[in-house]
Amino acid sequence: MSDASQPTGPSPSQAVNRQVVAATTVPTDRPLTEADIDALMAYPAGEPPAMVINAIDVKKIYRQGTHETHALRGATLDIFKREYLSIMGPSGSGKSTLFNMIGALGKPSEGKVYIDQVDIAHLDTNELAWLRCRKVGYIFQSYNLIQVMTCLENVTLPMAFAGVEGDAARERGIRILKLVGLGHRILHKPAELSGGQQQRVAIARALANEPEIVLADEPTANLDQHTGQEMIELLARLKDELGVTIISATHDLKMLQQSDRILWIEDGRIVRAAKPSEVDFSSKEFDH
Ligand SMILES: Nc1ncnc2c1ncn2[C@@H]1O[C@H](COP(=O)(O)OP(=O)(O)OP(=O)(O)O)[C@@H](O)[C@H]1O
Ligand SMILES: [Mg+2]
């Protein structure tokens, strides 16, 4: 990934040059202009740290026979190291699709995604596997746990891909499962767990290889308030203590309030950006 011969993305200075502005909303009745995108992507406070992900005009069209779904219609975003970014948007607006694109799980139909200045379209299969295994931790909306494996096996599986096996993997797996409050369920299989517990296994698995970036798709949606709060605090601690970048699709008020920045996506386009302090969380939009 750090190979100097890799094609590189926009220099970090381009981000540093962006102006600091207040909350921004762009009109949805016309195509976005460069100025709209600059305003949306301005870092909300002070000088931004290094960028970890840039997506540039990413479009994604799903084709089924003759039917086309335009899931992303040109999403441009910069994500900074150590940032806790929340993405909001109605069902079907493209949040999970955006996560797949910026997490290198899928290919955009158009546009570019850079992770650490590297254009991921230029990575070969091994480099992509390394990136997905070591650099990014995914918490999927639908958990994606392996049903025939125990909690511990689910959590240690990605470690095996990263070369950590045996006692070292088991010890790390147990430590992470305890961290998410599942120390008493390590030998249970997913079907023997509640939805919230499965969600916690999925979170533990995402942390298996100590990733620099965690992509969390509605990570608290199936958790009770107390466990949800614990997960939010865990993610915040990963950010503060380990410098992990957290990107989360969420409608969870507590999670939104904890973020450094919130982006709104509507019909495949980012239409609004704000810091939590600029948002009126008592407004109707946040009623559940
Ligand atoms: N694999 C796929 N094949 C075809 N269409 C898809 C696929 N994945 C998503 N879509 C469509 O793309 C659009 C965006 O879906 P996406 O899953 O990104 O939305 P979302 O914002 O994550 O929604 P939710 O809040 O319900 O999870 C939707 O219209 C969806 O039906
Ligand atoms: Mg989704």
Image (cartoon, rainbow, N blue to C red):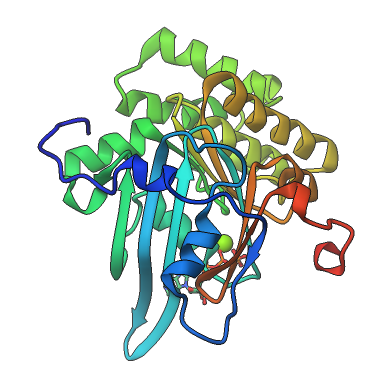
Question: Residue 166: x percent and y percent?
Answer: 38, 12
Res 201 → quadrant: top right
Instruction: Judge left or right: residue 124 versus residue 205.
Output: left
Question: Residue 63: x percent and y percent?
Answer: 34, 80
Residue located 51% across and 85% down the image? 30
Q: Nearer the viewer, residue 238 or 133?
A: 238
Pick out the residue farthest to the left: 5
Pick out the residue farthest to the top: 167
Pick out the residue farthest to the bottom: 66
Instruction: Judge left or right: residue 207 versus residue 168.
Output: right
Residue located 48% across and 40% down the image? 80
Q: Nearer the viewer, residue 88 or 140?
A: 88
Q: Which of 208 and 174 is in front in this view?
A: 208
Residue located 50% across and 73% down the image? 268
Question: Residue 15: x percent and y percent?
Answer: 41, 46
Residue located 44% across and 30% down the image? 212
**Is any part of residue 162 visible from this angle?**
yes
Res 228 → quadrant: top right
- Above/below status of 157 relative to 220: above
Question: Residue 128: x percent and y percent?
Answer: 25, 42
Q: Quadrant of the N terminus?
A: top left
- Above/below status of 49 relative to 249: above
Instruction: Judge left or right: residue 90 versus residue 215.
Output: right
